[in-house]
Image (cartoon, grey):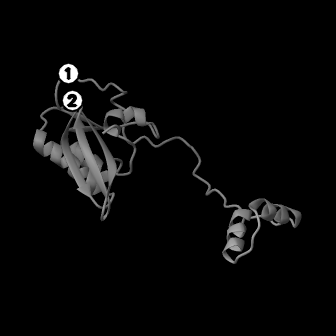
Amino acid sequence: YGYRRIHGDLREIGEVCSRNRVAKIMRKNRIQAIHGYKVPRGTRGRPSLIAPNRVQREFTVVKPNQVWVTDITYIRTWQGWLYLAVVIDLFARNVVGWSMKPTLSRELALDALLMAVWRRKPSENVIVHSDQGSQYGSDDWQRFCQANNLAPSMSRRGNCWDNAVAESF
């Protein structure tokens, strides 16, 4: 307990005193709150590269179905949170595929990409640019991209500017 919490407890039982007085008495008696500790994070080693960054912040393309960008956002509803995955074509900046589910899973991202492939039926190789979310690094995602003539591309870790078009959606 720190002085703020003890002060609140004292006020609840009817004692009248200031926070400063509680802090001073605790200091005088060498009573200290036990601080929480940070959970150690993994070391920042060399990042595993699942897919290269094929876009390199070049968000202007000359024809449709050259580059698609994708991201997942969440929407608060009365029943809880919903997750929305979108696939955006960089040429016209319109949504070509989307999926919404109550859980954040790889199927969410795959369904959005499936809708984009089904609606656009790309004949040439399309770059699909995403962040480094686990959904986009899954084996299912990689297999789907390979089977449908899509070239996966990933932004750098923790860099929202590499996927700015999708992040700003």
Q: Is residue 9 visible?
A: yes
Determine the residue positioned at 78% across, 59% down: 20
Amino acid carrying label 2: it is Gln
C-alpha span from label 2 to label 1:
8 Å
- Element class at badge 1: loop
Q: Which residue is mark 1?
A: 62
**Relative to 108, is 127 above or below?**
above
**Relative to 26, is 45 above or below?**
above
CB atoms at circles 2 and 1 under 8 Å apart?
Answer: yes
Taking depth in this image into account, of 128 and 4 the one nearest to the observer is: 4
Task: Give the percent coordinates (x, y) of residue 98.
Answer: 21, 48
- Mark 1 Cα shell of 10 Å, populated few (<14), some (14-19), many (≥20): few
- Mark 2 Cα shell of 10 Å, populated few (<14), some (14-19), many (≥20): some
Task: Give the percent coordinates (x, y) of residue 82.
Answer: 30, 57
- Element class at badge 2: loop
Q: Which residue is mark 2?
A: 66
